[in-house]
Structure formats: C-alpha cells, structure tokens
Amino acid sequence: MEEFAGRHAYRCLPVAIGNTYGWQLLLPVDVTAEWNGGSGVGDITVHCSHLHQAISHFQCGVLTFDVAYIFRTPPGYHLLVTGPTNVVKDGIAPMTALVESDWLPYTFTFNYRFTRPGRVAWKAGEPYAQICVVQANLQQSVQPVIRRLSDNAQLTADHLAWRARRCDLLACQRDVGGAGCKRTWDRDYFYGRYADGRNAQTEHTVKLRPKTPLDERTPEIVPTIEIMSQQSPGMRD
C-alpha cells in the first residue's frame, strides 16, 4: 500500500477496510522453513527458537503454526482464521479455516502450504494469521438469487449513471494525459454516495478500528525454592 505513488492504493476503500478487518496474530520469534518438495513430514526443515511455534506436523508441504491461545466467542459466533489480509509471501500460501470458538475448550493450529520447493522466513513481530468474528451458520441460511439487472429499474438507473460518470472520468484522464485531468477520482464509493450525489441509506464505513485486546491476566506467581546449605563439621568446600 505504501509503495504506490501518492499512496494511491488507499483510495480503494474495500482493500483498506479488508486490511484492518479483524485482529492479527504476531510471531514472538523468527521462523525459517524450507521444503524440499517431498510429501513426508521430514521434508520440511524448520528453524525456530520456540519449541512447537512452527513445525512440520502434516504432510505434502504443510507448515503448522501453534496459535497458543484458547479463543472464546459468544454463542452463535465463530472465528474465521486466515492469513494476514493482502499480505503475500512468495512460495507459500495460508490455509483459511473456520473455528467453532463458542464451545472449543482447546487451542488450534494455523497452517500454510508451500507452493513450490524453497525457503520462506518470518521475522519476530510479523503477522502470520488474522482472525475475524463471524456469525455462525449465516452462510447456509442465505439463499443466493440470480436476476437480470433490468428487473430492478432503480438499480439499473443507478448503475448506468455510475457507468457514465466512470467512463467520463477515464476519458478525461486518457485525453488530457492523466496528470492534466482535474478529476483524479470521483470518491463515490469512498464517501458512500451514488453518482447523482445521493448518500447511501445504509451504514457506511470509511475507517475500521478493531478494539485493542484487554489483558486481564493476573500476574503469574513464580514459585521460588530456597536452598539451604548446612556444612557439617569436617566437610571442606
């Protein structure tokens, strides 16, 4: 996002919101993994200072991360667990999972699969997974319906108005040479409005700020053992 000239990528609001949709899990240590292309568990070599943080547990080039948290959500809500959104790591891809966190009394693992033989690396503090709270069973309760656009007169009119406005913008940028066009972008989606200036009648999000987790852990009491040494008469140091 930062590499685009003028931070142009941030104008794509769906991508910008997607980047912050949920919470990311960060690695406490560096992790390096290498796959030789084989199908066995031993065909992945992992270097990591924390035991079990990242291991080769399955087969076929799958790298497994230990999440190390037990997540609990209210009844009827689950966790969609995926890789950090819009983050690409060459040579390996995250495997998305849905976890029934409203009853689960134990933790889970998060997996990546190598796309080709080679080596990949993560630095300490780098995100390796992202969790999003979703409503349980919502997908199977929704009935998708395919209709013709012309069946909805208002939607057709709004779409044609947007299309004409968009084509006019592209023609301006093309004919004037891009930089000379005063209209760099129309901001309709960004501001949640139709091409004719009407505002959307639903809630519109421009920035998403998930709440920072509250750390309610009580201080861990580490037991101490005092070792008393009594030297008996006649013993030497």
Image (cartoon, helix red, strand yellow):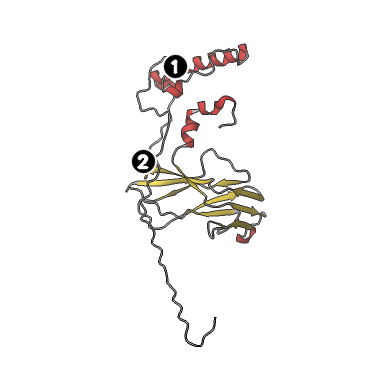
Instruction: Provide the residue designation for mark 2.
Output: 141
Q: Amino acid at mark 2?
A: Ser
Q: Residue furthest left?
A: 75
Element under disc 1? loop
Say which element carries label 2.
Answer: helix
| Label 1 sits on residue | 195
Q: Quadrant of residue 60?
A: bottom right
193 over 61 or under it: above or below: above
159 sits left or right of 40 in the view: left
**Callout 1: 10 Å neighbours few (<14), some, many (20+)?**
many
Q: Which mark is residue 47?
A: none
Task: Specify the quadrant that holds the C terminus.
Answer: bottom right
Q: Say whether disc 1 or disc 2 marks the residue closer to the N-terminus.
A: 2
Q: Of tags 1 and 2, which is closer to the observer? A: 1
Q: Is residue 98 above or below residue 169?
A: below
Residue 181 picture location, percent across and down: 57, 13
Whether tag 1 and tag 2 are in contact, CB under 8 A, the answer is no
Q: What residue lies at 43% left-to-right and 41% top-to-bottom?
A: 22
